Image (cartoon, rainbow, N blue to C red):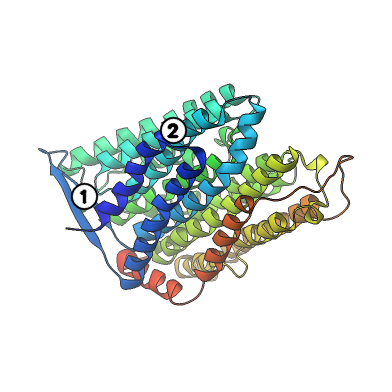
C-alpha cells in the first residue's frame, strides 16, 4: 500500500484533535502534522517516486476516486507543508495578541482557530494529490469555507463585510469550476484525471474565467486587497497558497488538452503582462502594509498566468514560481503580523526605521522580497524557465521579452522601495519602545527563507526540474 495516504491522513486527524487541546500543544501538533509529510514528500521528489492510492470506484461518469503523486503535485505539496507548518508557529503569539484585542478567551477561541487553520491547510494538500475532479472541487470548496470563517471570526474592523465579500467572489470560481468539471466528466465519461483525453473549448473557457477570479487578475481583483487588509495575518499565509492552486488546476487540465491556450495564447499573455505591471505599480500607491502585499500578490500571480502560455518550459516555471511566491509572500505577511503583534502598526505612515527595533523580522523581510524579485532564491530558477519559455514560443520577440523582463524588474523595484520605507530611514511614529521579539515571530520565517535558497541548489533543484520534465515533457510550445 502507498505510504502517501498515511501522510495525507495525519493532518486530517490532527485537524480534529486540536479541538481538545491547549494553545501551545495544539500549535506544535499542527506544525508537526505538516513537517512530517514535508520530509516524506521531499524524499519522494529526490528519489523520483510517483505513487497512486485507490480509494473507491463509482459508476460512470464519476469513475475511479484515487490519490496520486508526481513531481508537480510534490512541488506544490512541499510549499503547502512548509508554509503551513511554519505559519502555525507564528499563529501562537499573533493570535494571543489578536484575541486579547478582541477580548476573547485564548484557550477556547484558539481551539476553533487551530481547527479552521488545519482544515484550510489540509484541504489544499488533499486537493493537489486528488486524482478525481470530484475531490478537486470538494477540497476547493472546503478551503473557501474555512477561509471565510477565519476572516469572519478573527479579522479586523470590517471583517464581517470582508468575509462576505470574499465568499461571494469565491462563489464564482467555485460554480464555474463545478460546471466545467461536469462538462469534462460527461464528455470523457469519467472524472478521473487519468481517464481524461479531451477538454472542450466551452469547458476550458468556463474554467479559465472562473480561475482568473481566484488568481486574481486585474479587473476582477477587488476582493483581494480588502481580504489582505482585514484578515488575521497567519491565515493569509494559507490564502496565498490557495490562490496559487488556480495555476495547479489549469496546469493539470492543460496536460490533458491544451487547445484553449493554443488558440488564445497571445491575448492571455498580453492580459497577464498588463495585469502584472499594473498591479506592480499599484503597490506604490498603498498606505496599508498588508494591502500593498495584496497588490504584490496580484502582480506575482500574473507570472503563473504568463507561464501557462509558454509551453513546457513555461509550465515548469509556473510550478517553481508557485514555490517562490509561497515562500516569499508568506514571509512578508508574517513580518506584517509581527509588526501588528508588537506595535499594532498597519499603516506605512507609522513605520520607518523598524530595523533598529526588530532586526530579526527586518532581515526576514529582506529574504521575502528577494524571493519575489527572483534574486538568489528559487524564484530565480522560475524566472529563467519563464524567459526560456518565451524564447522557445515566440523567439527573440522584443514585444514579449521586454514587458516580461520589466515585470521581473518591477518586483525588485517595489520590493526594495518598501524595505526602505518600512524598516529603514527615519522613524515616522512619535511612540517607539524596544520590545522583546519572540522566536515564534521570526525563526519560522528564517526557516522558510533558508528553504527558498536551498531549493535553488543541488540536490533539490536538479531533482525538481528532472521530475517536472518527466511529467510535463512532450508539451510543445
Please, what secondary structure does the residue beneath circle 1 have? loop
Please indicate whether residue 368 sits to the left or right of residue 265 in the image: right
The image's mark for residue 110 is none
Please tell me in which quadrant of the rendered image residue 56 appears.
top left
Nearer-N-terminus badge (1/2): 2
Foreground of the two, 381 or 109: 109
Give me the residue at 36% from left, 30% from top: 175
Residue drawn at x 37%, y 34% is: 141
Task: Judge left or right: residue 433 versus residue 308.
Answer: right
- In percent of the image, x 47 and y 44: which residue is there? 25
Q: Secondary structure at mark 2?
A: helix
| Residue 295 in picture, x, y percent from top left | 63, 44
Residue 126 in view in this figure? yes
Q: Position of residue 313 (x, y in %)?
A: 43, 67
Q: Image quadrant for the N terminus?
A: bottom left
Q: Nearer the viewer, mark 1 or mark 2?
A: 2
Checking the image for residue 196, the label placed there is 1
Q: Is residue 4 above or below residue 456?
A: above
Residue 146 tag number? 2
Q: Is residue 166 visible?
A: no
Amino acid at each position: 500500500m502507498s505510504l502517501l495516504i498515511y501522510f495525507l491522513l495525519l493532518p486530517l486527524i490532527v485537524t480534529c484533535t486540536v479541538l481538545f487541546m491547549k494553545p501551545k500543544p495544539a500549535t506544535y501538533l499542527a506544525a508537526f502534522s505538516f513537517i512530517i509529510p514535508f520530509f516524506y514528500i521531499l524524499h519522494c521528489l529526490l528519489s523520483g517516486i510517483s505513487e497512486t492510492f485507490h480509494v473507491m470506484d463509482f459508476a460512470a461518469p464519476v469513475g475511479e476516486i484515487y490519490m496520486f503523486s508526481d513531481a508537480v503535485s510534490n512541488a506544490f505539496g512541499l510549499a503547502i507543508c512548509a508554509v503551513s507548518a511554519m505559519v502555525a508557529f507564528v499563529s501562537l503569539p499573533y493570535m494571543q495578541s489578536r484575541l486579547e484585542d478582541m477580548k476573547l478567551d485564548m484557550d477556547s477561541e484558539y481551539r476553533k482557530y487551530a481547527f479552521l487553520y488545519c482544515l484550510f491547510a489540509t484541504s489544499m494538500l488533499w486537493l493537489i494529490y486528488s486524482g478525481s475532479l470530484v475531490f478537486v472541487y470538494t477540497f476547493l470548496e472546503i478551503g473557501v469555507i474555512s477561509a471565510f470563517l477565519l476572516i469572519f471570526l478573527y479579522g479586523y474592523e470590517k471583517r464581517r463585510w470582508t468575509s462576505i465579500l470574499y465568499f461571494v467572489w469565491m462563489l464564482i470560481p467555485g460554480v464555474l469550476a463545478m460546471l466545467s468539471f461536469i462538462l469534462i466528466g460527461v464528455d470523457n465519461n469519467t472524472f478521473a484525471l487519468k481517464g481524461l483525453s479531451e477538454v472542450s473549448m466551452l469547458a476550458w473557457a468556463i474554467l479559465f474565467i472562473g480561475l482568473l477570479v481566484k488568481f486574481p487578475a486585474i479587473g476582477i481583483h477587488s476582493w483581494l486587497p480588502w481580504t489582505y487588509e482585514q484578515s488575521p495575518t497567519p491565515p493569509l499565509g494559507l490564502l496565498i497558497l490557495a490562490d496559487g492552486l488556480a495555476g495547479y488546476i489549469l496546469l493539470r487540465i492543460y496536460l490533458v488538452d491544451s487547445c484553449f491556450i493554443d488558440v488564445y495564447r497571445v491575448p492571455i499573455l498580453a492580459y497577464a503582462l498588463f495585469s502584472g505591471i499594473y498591479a506592480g505599480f499599484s503597490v506604490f500607491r498603498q498606505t496599508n502594509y498588508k494591502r500593498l502585499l495584496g497588490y504584490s500578490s496580484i502582480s506575482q500571480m500574473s507570472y503563473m498566468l504568463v507561464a501557462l502560455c509558454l509551453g513546457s518550459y513555461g509550465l515548469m516555471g509556473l510550478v517553481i514560481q508557485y514555490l517562490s511566491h509561497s515562500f516569499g509572500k508568506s514571509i512578508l505577511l508574517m513580518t506584517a503580523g509581527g509588526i501588528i503583534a508588537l506595535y499594532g502598526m498597519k499603516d506605512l505612515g507609522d513605520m520607518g526605521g523598524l530595523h533598529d527595533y526588530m532586526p530579526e523580522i527586518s532581515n526576514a523581510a529582506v529574504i521575502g522580497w528577494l524571493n519575489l524579485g527572483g534574486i538568489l532564491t528559487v524564484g530565480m530558477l522560475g524566472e529563467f524557465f519563464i524567459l526560456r519559455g518565451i524564447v522557445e514560443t515566440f523567439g527573440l520577440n522584443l514585444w514579449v521579452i521586454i514587458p516580461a523582463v520589466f515585470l521581473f524588474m518591477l518586483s525588485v523595484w517595489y520590493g526594495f522601495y518598501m524595505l526602505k520605507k518600512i524598516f529603514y530611514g527615519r522613524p515616522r511614529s512619535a511612540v517607539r519602545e524596544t520590545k522583546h521579539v519572540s522566536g515564534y515571530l521570526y525563526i519560522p520565517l528564517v526557516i522558510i527563507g533558508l528553504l527558498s535558497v536551498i531549493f535553488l541548489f543541488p540536490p533539490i533543484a536538479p531533482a525538481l526540474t528532472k521530475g517536472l520534465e518527466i511529467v510535463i515533457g512532450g508539451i510543445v510550445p
